[in-house]
């Protein structure tokens, strides 16, 4: 989890639907190759990773369909909002991801984008398996029951 006390570490974007749509088996932290205008835009808070995913192609890991808002002060040397961005992981992690996607039918889902304590942009990836509709209903029902149970416990404690 990102420390809130450190002024350099800051949450940029979060994919809240990831835990609802997928069973997250494991997670890992990856670096991301960005242009200068992209980093400045992220410091202003213009990013969305909700519709994005990661893919292993040609022996490299790529973030596909991640949105970074244009930086208005970079007129000539700006960036494309939804370009493919290279993710930086070790060879061992890359081979593990490639095996998980190829053999086990897993998906690589971006969960959080944040600045770490050194001020470098990092992306938390989850190795996940997609949920079926019944699994989503079960998750929703469990969450509702937990809320109702907490409400009942609170009422009992007040009486």
Image (cartoon, helix red, strand yellow):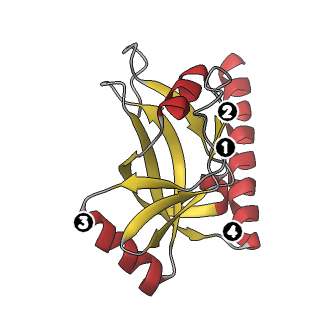
Query: Which mark, by number, is residue 70?
Result: 2
N-term mark: 4 or 2: 2
Find the distance from the CA under tag 2 to the CA under tag 1.
6 Å
In the rendered picture of this protein, how many numbered marks are placed on residues? 4
Residue lying at 44% horizontally and 47% vertically, measured from the top left: 124
The residue tagged 4 is 135
Where in the figure is residue 94, as x and y percent of width and height? 32, 67
Report x, y in % for residue 29.
36, 48
The residue identified by callout 3 is: 91
N-terminal of the pair, mark 3 or mark 1, is: 1
Labelled pair 2, 3 in contact (Cβ < 8 Å): no
- Horizontally, is 54 left or right of 3 in the view? right
Looking at the picture, does residue 41 appear above or below residue 133?
Answer: above
Q: Residue at x 53, y 52 (%)?
A: 110
For marks 1 and 4 on the same chain, the one whose residue lies earlier in the sequence: 1
| 138 with respect to 54 (left or right) | right
Quick check: 35 above or below 96?
A: above
Left or right of residue 67, residue 111 in this image: left
């Amino acid at each position: 989890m990102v420390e809130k006390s450190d002024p350099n570490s800051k949450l940029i974007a979060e994919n809240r639907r990831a835990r609802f749509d997928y069973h997250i088996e494991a997670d890992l932290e990856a670096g991301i190759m960005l242009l200068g205008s992209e980093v400045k835009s992220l410091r202003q808070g213009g990013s969305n990773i909700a519709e994005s995913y990661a893919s292993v192609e040609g022996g490299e890991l790529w973030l596909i369909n991640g949105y970074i808002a244009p930086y208005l002060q970079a007129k000539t040397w700006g960036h494309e909002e939804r370009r493919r961005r290279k993710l930086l992981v070790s060879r061992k992690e890359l081979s593990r991801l490639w095996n998980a996607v190829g053999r086990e039918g897993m998906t690589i889902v971006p969960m959080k984008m944040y600045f770490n304590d050194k001020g470098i942009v990092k992306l938390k990836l989850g190795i996940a398996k997609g949920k079926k509709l019944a699994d989503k209903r079960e998750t929703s029902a469990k969450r509702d029951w937990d809320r109702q149970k907490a409400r009942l416990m609170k009422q009992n404690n007040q009486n």
